[in-house]
Structure formats: C-alpha cells, structure tokens
C-alpha cells in the first residue's frame, strides 16, 4: 500500500502541474497578441512620441525635455528679435508701378474687328484668377476682343458661381477699356450666336507662340475658345505686357460688393481684438497631404486614407516620403508652423486668423498650434452662420473671404507654394511689401526631429537663420525668378529720393538714376543688376504643383514649336491643392 501511494503521488502532481503551465502559457501568448495590436511600429512610435513631446512643451513652458544634457523649453513670449515683426524697414522705399508706357497704344487703335477670344478657366478661385489675368494679356497680343471668362464649374471644387458672382464685371470692363476691349457675351450674326473654335495652347506659351498657333485660327474662324486656361502664358514678357498683367491682377479684378463687405467685417473683427494679427494659410487638408506624398506618423491608417485620395491623380509616381521632405515638398504640421513663428519672435499673445479647410487629423492635429497661440480664429469663429450662409455653399466665395483677410493681415504666413500663396505674395509686394513668411521647408525639415537635442535658444537661432530670404523683404528674390504672379518685379519701383533722404543710399545700393535734365527718376526693380542680391536668395521653383519636375533639361527641342513656348507640356493634373 505504501508503494502504491508513492507511485500515485507523482501522477497527481503531474496532473496539477500540466494545466497550470498551459494556463500561464496561454495568458502570456494572449498578452503578446494584445501588445502587438496596440503598440505601433518602431518608426511610427518614434514619430508619435516626438509629436507628443512637442505637445507637452507647447502646453506648459515649464515642461522640458532633458536629453544629452540639453533642455528644450518653449517660451510663452517671443523674446527680442531685434527688429519690427510687423513691418519691413525697407518697405517705404518701394511701391507698385503698373502704368502703361507712352508706346502702349490704346485698345481703340489696336483691336481688330471679327476677332473674339474666349477662355475657360481651370481649378479653384486663385488658379482661375491667374487664368483671367493672362487671358487679358493674350487678347492684347492677338489684338482681339475678350469675352468675359467662363469660370470652372466642373472640377473638384464644384462651385456653380459665374464671373459676375465673384468679381465686379462692370468695373473689370471699365478699368481695362484702354488696354483691351471686353464684352459680356458674343455678338449675334444673322440672328445666331457665333460658334467658337475650341483649342488649347501649351503652358508657358510666349507672345510668338500665340501669334503662330492661335492667330491663324482666329483669322479663319473669328472666334476661338482656349480651354483649361491656367498658366498658358509665358512667365517672361515685354515690360508693357507685364505691367498689363499687374493692372488686371491688382486693380481690375475686384470682388463683388457682398464679398468685399463681408471680408471687411472679418478684418474689422480681427482688428477689434488686436492691433496686429497674423493670417495663416495652413493648407493641411487631406488632398494637400495626399498630393505631396508626405508621411506624418499616422501609421497604416494615414497611409491608407491618403493613399486612396492620391489615386485621383493617375499620372503621379510612387512617392518617397523622406525624399519629399528633404526636398522641402512637405507642408509643415500645424505644430511646426507654431514653433517656427515662436522662434521668429511671435509670442503667445499674438492673434492668428487661420484660412483653412478641413485639417487632417482635426482638433488633435490643431491642439499644439492652439496651445502655442491661444488667440486662434477663423471666419467661422468671428462670424455667425447666418452671416456666412450666402457664401458657405460656394467654395470660391468662401475662398474669397479668406483671401481678403489674408491680404489685409499685418503678416501673412503660407504653408505651401500654391496659387493663393503665390498671388498673395505678389500682391503684398506690390502694395507695400507687407511681411509674407514662407517656411524654408527644405532647411527646416531636419530641425524639428532634432529639437530635443538642443536648447530653445539654439533652435530659434537656426530657424531665424534658415528663414532669411523667406520673409517677404524687398529684393529678397532676384528679378525674373519664380512665377511672375509671385514676384512681379517689373511692377515694383524704388523711390530713389526717399532712399537718399533716409541716408541709406550707397553707391552699391542705389537704383535711382538721373535723367537728362538731372532729375531723380525711379527704376524698376526688374532692371536691377545682379550685385544687389546675396548668395542666400531663396530658390523659388518655376513650376507649379503637379507639373513635371523631372523635365528634359538640356535636351534639344524636337520641333519648331518648341521655339515658341518655354517648357514641355506637363501632365494634365487636377491641381486641387493649388488654392
């Protein structure tokens, strides 16, 4: 019996031990499965941790990161920047100048009978604005009568507004009457409206290109409609044609009274809150991020969502997010924009008006920016739904309201280089060089991930250094660089007398000159010599988003037509990000 008990005892112990081990193993396995689901990949986790670190430092300036002995503490105040944040010291020496020369004949002498030019614009409000501006110049080149342009009502923006619902058409026709004859609709012939011949010209088509491609058709058909008319005119033209561009863009294109009145109310309400304010064109919507091909640490969810949107552009190549960011093609996050502004000297008491659509990531994405700048506003926060209701169903009219506030702001900050950013940059140069900040994303991209390894003072110093040449100062960009709408150098003159009175004119800086009678005359900035510009001038691209940036540089043209336009026809993309 004793022997049987000893044999039975190990069997009982074994029967108890095996279930216990199995239960523990199952628990461990279940725990590992749960952790594998909840914990992001190492790359995503690192980026998300970086974003969280930003957020905590933004919320409370007493919170700091201590890594390698460095302390990164974001101050509430902007500190001493050593200059006026709200104005350029040199702006008073420059002014917009777009009057025609004595050689530019009046339209009544140049317009030929039976020549009618129609255009169909493309894209959002500001992309269409460039098309309207260039259409007036194209009509002048062809000595044709321009029919009031048709706005794009079928693209991504799906806005049914016509020209007269956005712009003051009577003012448009009247202001340009000496330059180009403009009519509201085609005349009838034999009781019937003339039928237009539809065609398209290449992008960046020169004056000679229009004379060789369009004029023969116009002489034969009498009415020509140019389709998808965006960036269809060369960047460089004769001086008088460039000045005509400026007269159209900065004077003739005036919003309708309802839009201007509502825009004025928004500006007044921002002024009631603060003497100065920043307008920020955030442009962090899903379509923008999808088109850019950038990645912001949102894991598979972000890749799936933005990847689905990116498929709208069938000609886009597969993106390399790291490469896009290195090349400055990625918009800064709202948090990064806020840190840049703080480093430039703007404190937490500054008021910001944000012009933006639906921000990707919603309030979670905006939280760090709002923590840095609590006085955060948009048209929706300073106007009632009832006030915005006449505009809210029309994307172009809502964009026009943002355009007005951004134009009137003391400082305008753009987070991409699309059409609204370009047009406003050029307009603010023309009307007094009001500060316009464009992030130097190419230089800043490596700064933000490494901020925890440096002090705030070192970080801010590097931001200020990288932003030289990207602040909207006079002579920041060499004449002829970038799109003309962005850098209208031909239409900006220097006041030599004012500069001399200020005692800042040196032999190497003076642009003013004496005429034959010994009088001071102003000189176009476009005529300035190269020695006026530093080696640090900003390298602004000549191509718009969606154009083929990997063009055939250095290749010889295959046909005579290449003599008439500046670059090859790029892929036809619906540039929804451009506005």
Image: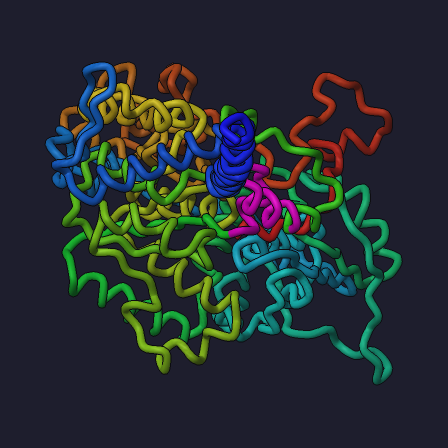
| Residue 100 forms part of the magenta stretch | no
Hey, which quadrant is residue 236 in on the image? top right
The residue under the point 85% across, 49% down is 216
The residue under the point 20% across, 43% down is 86
Can residue 329 be seen in this snapshot? Answer: no
Towards the viewer: 174 or 294: 294
Chosen colour scheme: rainbow
Query: In this view, which residue lies farthest toward the front?
Result: 1
Position of 453 with respect to 235 (left or right) is: left
Towards the viewer: 31 or 106: 31
Give the magenta-colored segment's residue range: 286-308
Position of 500 with respect to 296 (left or right) is: left
Asked if 38 appears above or below 326 in the picture, the reply is below
Asked if 222 appears above or below 350 in the picture, the reply is below
Asked if 308 appears above or below 484 in the picture, the reply is below
Towards the viewer: 229 or 233: 229
| Residue 302 forms part of the magenta stretch | yes
Can residue 209 be seen in this snapshot? Answer: yes
The residue under the point 57% across, 51% down is 287
Magenta: main secondary structure equals: helix
Residue 222 percent across, percent down from the top left? 82, 62
Hey, which quadrant is residue 455 in on the image? top left
Residue 108 percent across, percent down from the top left? 62, 61
Query: In this view, which residue lies farthest toward the bottom?
Result: 191
Position of 82 with respect to 237 (left or right) is: left
The residue under the point 81% across, 77% down is 193
Towards the viewer: 563 or 468: 468
Residue 260 percent across, percent down from the top left? 37, 70
Residue 440 percent across, percent down from the top left? 40, 29
Hey, which quadrant is residue 129 in on the image? bottom right
Position of 29 with respect to 80 (left or right) is: right
């Amino acid at each position: 019996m004793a022997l049987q008990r000893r044999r039975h005892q190990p069997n009982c112990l074994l029967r108890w031990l095996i279930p216990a081990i199995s239960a523990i193993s199952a628990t461990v396995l279940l725990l590992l499965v749960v952790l594998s689901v909840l914990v992001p990949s190492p790359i995503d986790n690192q980026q998300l941790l970086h974003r969280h670190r930003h957020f905590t430092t933004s919320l409370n300036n007493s919170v700091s990161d201590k890594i390698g002995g460095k302390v990164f503490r974001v101050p509430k105040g902007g500190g001493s920047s050593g200059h006026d944040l709200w104005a350029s010291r040199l702006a008073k020496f420059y002014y917009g100048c777009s009057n025609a020369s004595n050689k530019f004949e009046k339209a009544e002498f140049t317009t030929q009978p039976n020549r009618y030019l129609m255009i169909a614009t493309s894209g959002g409000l500001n992309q269409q604005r460039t098309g309207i501006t260039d259409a007036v110049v194209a009509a002048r080149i062809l000595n044709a009568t321009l029919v009031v342009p048709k706005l794009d009502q079928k693209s991504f923006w799906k806005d049914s507004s016509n020209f007269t619902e956005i712009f003051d058409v009577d003012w448009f026709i009247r202001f340009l009457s000496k330059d180009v004859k403009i009519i509201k609709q085609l005349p009838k012939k034999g009781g019937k409206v003339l039928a237009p011949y539809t065609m398209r010209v290449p992008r960046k088509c020169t004056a000679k290109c229009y004379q060789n491609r369009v004029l023969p058709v116009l002489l034969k058909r009498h009415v020509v409609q140019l389709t998808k008319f965006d960036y269809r005119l060369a960047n460089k033209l004769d001086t008088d044609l460039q000045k005509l561009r400026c007269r159209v863009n900065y004077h003739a294109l005036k919003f309708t009274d309802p839009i201007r009145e509502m825009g004025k109310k928004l500006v007044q309400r921002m002024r009631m809150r603060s003497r100065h304010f920043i307008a920020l064109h955030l442009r962090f919507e899903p379509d923008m991020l999808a088109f850019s091909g950038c990645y912001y640490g949102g894991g598979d969810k972000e890749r799936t969502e933005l990847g689905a949107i990116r498929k709208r552009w069938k000609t886009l190549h597969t993106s390399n997010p790291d490469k896009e960011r290195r090349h400055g093609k990625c918009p800064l996050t709202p948090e990064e924009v806020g840190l840049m502004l703080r480093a430039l000297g703007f404190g937490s008491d500054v008021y910001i008006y944000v012009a933006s659509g639906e921000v990707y990531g919603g309030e979670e994405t905006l939280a760090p920016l709002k923590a840095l700048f609590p006085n955060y506003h948009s048209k929706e926060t300073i106007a009632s739904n009832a006030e915005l209701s006449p505009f809210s169903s029309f994307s172009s009219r809502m964009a026009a309201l943002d355009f007005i506030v951004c134009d009137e702001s003391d400082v305008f900050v753009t987070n991409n280089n699309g059409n609204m950013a370009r047009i406003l940059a050029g307009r603010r140069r023309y009307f007094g060089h009001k500060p316009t900040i464009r992030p130097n994303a190419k230089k800043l991209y490596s700064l933000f991930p490494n901020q925890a390894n440096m002090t705030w003072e070192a970080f801010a110093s590097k931001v200020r250094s990288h932003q030289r040449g990207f602040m909207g100062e006079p002579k920041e960009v060499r004449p002829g660089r970038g799109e003309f709408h962005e850098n209208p150098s031909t239409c900006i003159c220097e006041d030599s007398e004012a500069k001399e009175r200020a005692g800042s004119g040196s032999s190497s800086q003076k642009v003013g000159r004496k005429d034959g009678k010994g009088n001071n005359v102003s000189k176009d900035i476009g005529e300035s010599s190269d020695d006026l510009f530093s080696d640090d001038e900003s390298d602004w691209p000549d191509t718009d988003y969606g154009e083929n940036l990997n063009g055939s540089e250095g290749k010889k043209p295959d046909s005579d037509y290449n003599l008439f336009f500046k670059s090859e026809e790029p892929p036809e993309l619906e540039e929804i990000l451009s506005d």
